[in-house]
Amino acid sequence: MNSLLLTGALCAAALPARAAEPVIEGATARQSGGGWTFSVTLSHPDTGWAHYADGWRVLGMDGTELGLRVLAHPHEQEQPFTRSLSGVQIPEGTAQVQIQARCLVDGWGKDTYVLTLP
């Protein structure tokens, strides 16, 4: 029985650890010219160039991607941090959108932030 427990523990230790997902702490949107500007505040335990929050996107409520903000570097010393994206085209009559964050290592987070448009 001890060897079975040891084998299970060793197998579990060999699995890659998933870090915490990026968390969207807040977001705002405003109409700007012919499009929308989104400002998104997110946090993530960035550890450097090998593992950091590397983007976020605006989605329709049906999951259609409306805009993508790529984050080009880690924010180890700036948590949480806010970045904006302008020129996002939102279909007429849209009342809400979703925002989803991405991590370089773990990909898109499973949770989205629902934002009601002003």
Image (cartoon, grey):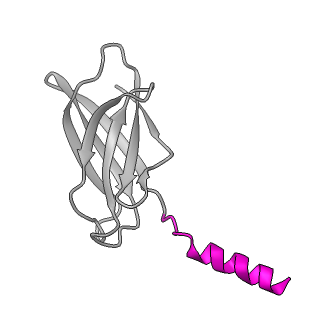
User: In which image quadrant can residue 60 be found?
Assistant: top left
Q: Looking at this view, is 55 or 4 the one in front?
A: 4
Residue occupying the far top of the picture: 93
The x and y percentages for residue 11 are: 64, 75
Frontmost residue, 102 versus 5: 5
The quarter of the rendered structure image containing the N terminus is bottom right
Question: Taken as a whole, is the magenta stretch helix, strand or loop?
Answer: helix
Magenta stretch: includes residue 15: yes
- In the displayed structure, 42 sits above or below 64; it is below
Task: Quarter of the image for the C terminus: give it.
Answer: top left
Total residue callouts? 0
Residue 83 percent across, percent down from the top left: 25, 50
Residue 86 higher or lower than 108, as above or below: above
Q: Is residue 113 left or right of residue 42?
A: right
Q: Which residues are magenta?
A: 1-19
User: Residue 37: image x %, image y %?
Assistant: 22, 34
Task: Identify the residue at horizontal 46%, vertical 57% (top origin).
Answer: 21
Residue 47 horizontal/vertical position (percent):
35, 72
Residue 92, compared with residue 35, is above or below; it is: above
Residue extending furthest right? 1
**Relative to 42, is 49 on the left or the right?**
left
Tell me which corner region of the image, top left, top right, bottom left or bottom right, holds residue 68: top left
Task: Reply above or below: 82 against 59.
Answer: below
Magenta stretch containing residue 32, yes or no? Answer: no
- Residue at the farthest left position: 33
Q: Name, please, the residue furthest toward the bottom.
A: 2
